């Protein structure tokens, strides 16, 4: 029989998973309503906020397999939301850079996305959000030290 503490850990896992699923589904629906899939949005959002990025590093920054990045970048390039730019000093490196059209699109979309997330998390007070941030960060950082 599992101890009460083990049961509590399992319950926390289930509650976290359900909350993540609910938030992800709502944000993904908003993103898809605006003509992108969540991965395309993640790439555009990265370029919008962080500027030009080497293609080889985008996958790590948005937690996506490198093979999928090429496909996503191709789709965004066809829509003129980003452009591939060769590195002038290293021919092995190609950057993805958001275009003016991509920036205009994100100028409109991102504030709505931000507001949607704010509404989704509106059940928590500012203090509760801060506590959740600290606790989840502590949890995430502690897992790096564990191995299965």
Image: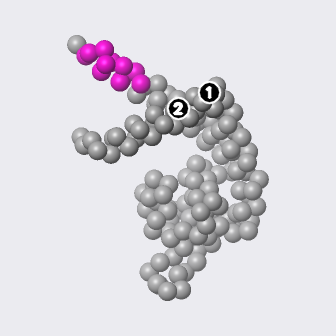
User: Can residue 146 be seen in the rendering of this structure?
Assistant: yes
Q: Mostly what secondary structure, the magenta segment? A: helix
Query: Start and end of the magenta stretch?
Result: 2-12
- The answer to which of marks 1 and 2 sits earlier in the sequence is 1
Question: For this view, does 76 lie left or right of residue 142?
Answer: right
Q: Residue furthest bottom?
A: 89
Q: Is residue 23 above or below residue 44?
A: above
Task: Name the one closer to the observer, 83 or 136.
Answer: 136
Check residue 5 for magenta coloring: yes
Of marks 1 and 2, the one in the foreground: 2
- Residue at 53% over, 81% down: 87
Q: Could you say which disc has been placed on residue 124 in the image?
A: 1
Question: For this view, does 13 lie left or right of residue 24?
Answer: left
- Residue at 56% over, 64% down: 73
Quarter of the picture containing the C terminus is top left
Q: Is residue 16 above or below residue 144?
A: above
Q: Could you say which disc has been placed on residue 84 in the image?
A: none
Question: Secondary structure under badge 2?
Answer: helix
Question: For this view, does 143 lie left or right of residue 82?
Answer: left
Quadrant of res 120: top right
Task: Name the one closer to the observer, 129 or 2.
Answer: 129
Give the residue pinned by disc 2: 131
User: Can residue 21 be seen in the rendering of this structure?
Assistant: no
Alpha carbon of mark 1 to alpha carbon of mark 2: how far? 10 Å
Question: At which x and y percent is residue 60?
Answer: 44, 58
Question: At which x and y percent is residue 110?
Answer: 70, 50
Question: At which x and y percent is residue 108?
Answer: 77, 53
């Amino acid at each position: 029989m599992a101890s009460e503490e083990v049961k509590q850990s399992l319950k926390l896992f289930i509650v976290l998973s359900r909350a993540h699923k609910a938030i992800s589904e709502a944000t993904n629906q908003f993103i898809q309503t605006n003509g992108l899939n969540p991965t395309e949005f993640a790439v555009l959002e990265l370029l919008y906020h962080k500027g030009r990025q080497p293609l080889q590093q985008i996958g790590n920054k948005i937690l996506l397999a490198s093979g999928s990045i090429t496909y996503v970048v191709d789709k965004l390039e066809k829509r003129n939301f980003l452009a591939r730019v060769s590195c002038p000093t290293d021919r092995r490196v190609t950057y993805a850079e958001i275009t003016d059209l991509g920036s205009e699109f994100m100028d409109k979309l991102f504030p709505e996305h931000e507001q949607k997330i704010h509404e989704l998390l509106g059940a928590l007070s500012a203090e509760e959000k801060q506590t959740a941030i600290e606790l989840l960060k502590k949890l995430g950082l502690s897992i790096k030290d564990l191995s299965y």
